Image (cartoon, grey):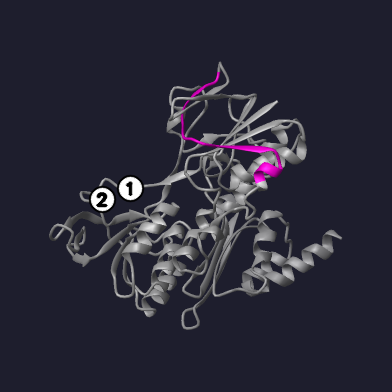
Amino acid sequence: MKHLILGNGPAGVVAAETLRHSDTQCEILMAGSEDEPPYSRMAIPYLLEENIDESGTYLRKSPDHFDSLGISQLRGRAVSLDINEHQVLFQDGHSETYDRLLIATGSHPVRPPIPGIDLPNVHTCWTLDDARAIASLTKPGTRVLQLGAGFIGCIILEALANRGVKLTVVEMGDRMVPRMMTPKAGGMIKRWVENKGIQVRTSAGVERIDETEKGGPLRVSLNTGETLECDVVIVSAGVVPNIGFLEGTPLHVAKGILVNDAMQTSVPEIYAAGDVAEAPDLFTGAHLVSAIQPNAADQARVAAINMAGGQTHLKGVLAINVLDTLGLISTSFGQWEGVNEREGGSGAELIDEEAFRYLSLQFKDDVMIGATSIGWTEHVGVLRGLIQGQVRLGERKQQLMHDPTRFMAAYLGAAQAIA
């Protein structure tokens, strides 16, 4: 049995190791498209902060880790898939066959169609090559404009700030991290960041980027009419799944590759996991792409066990976001926006602007389905537990509606009730 894994990020690595644990005799080939050892993109900000060196980004520290497990590696980018021949064609012209295929090709950064987006000092921050370029261009006092203040953008923001640059952030949404935070919470993060000396423009977009002179500073024009001058532009406008090579195949694809709760695609011997997979949501069953490492690892384990002949299922994708923005901890879990009252939705909110503390709990009937927090570090994982466990709270729900801070007591009370 030959297992071919496309992608050597967290999903690919976890899947390869799980396959080897499940089947000591099968052939495993893991293909990565970069000329680097398997590494974590989430470690790149720490590299930019110089808290780690490049080896600190590697997913496995021992150089012979994969060899010792009998996992073969290949450097190559998939360009097409032939499901009839069970064959993948790579960019260098060679092909690999498979009995079972896992697509874990991850995602790539969005480069908006902005005039000037391809100028030399305009970079994304997604690969080790990107990190090397940004490190060479930025030093204390360098004027940097960052396009985007989403989850990944805020992680990059912190790394840039810690390099001592003079930073301006431009975000199209009406608040920071708009796909993770309520309006009030996103506004609080903006105020915190501005207090740290970073300029933030929300409800603003970049219309064009121009060189003031060859090799000179950049002039960035916003749709608000404002013009800003900087030395470097960092583009953090989101990511999209790497699915272009699947064009012309019968795999069902929407935003990502549609999979069932076994991580199986519409073609039975092909599976998908990680940023590229569009899997059922924990609560609604609707398919969604959740480009975060914990979901990638969970999906990879499920896919690998099923590829090896086992039977297991993913309970459902849960949105999990934990962010440290210049010392301000924020989290959001599940359906943090809540559902409307007609669907049994209700919520409770606690706001302390002065102390930068915020808590929002969202319910459907007596089950907590989502939560958002700022400034809470103690027991915050309990919120995830209550949501992921779909715990029926009974009368404890009303207690939380009155005082959202009692979530730990609600968790312990629900656990005792079950016991």
Farthest residue to the top: give it. 84
Location of residue 70 (image quadrant): top right
Q: Residue at x 21, y 58 (%)?
A: 223
- Up-down relation of residue 283 to residue 378 (above or below): above
Q: Is residue 314 visible?
A: no
Residue at the spot of label 1: 111
How far across and down, in percent of the image, does residue 287 sit? 55, 40
Give the quarter of the figure containing the C terminus.
Answer: bottom right
Where disc 2 sits, the SS reads loop
Farthest residue to the left: give it. 213
- Up-down relation of residue 178 to residue 64 (above or below): below
Would residue 82 be counted in the magenta stretch?
yes
- Up-down relation of residue 237 to residue 182 (above or below): above
Farthest residue to the bottom: give it. 354
Label number found at residue 117: 2
In the depicted view, which residue is nearer to us: 107 or 328? Answer: 107
Location of residue 377 (image quadrant): bottom right
Magenta region, residue range: 66-83
In screen coordinates, is 121 left or right of 162? left
Amino acid under label 1? Arg
Where disc 1 sits, the SS reads loop
In screen coordinates, is 36 left or right of 298? left
Amino acid under label 2? Ile
How far across and down, in percent of the image, does residue 8 sit? 56, 43
Label number found at residue 39: none
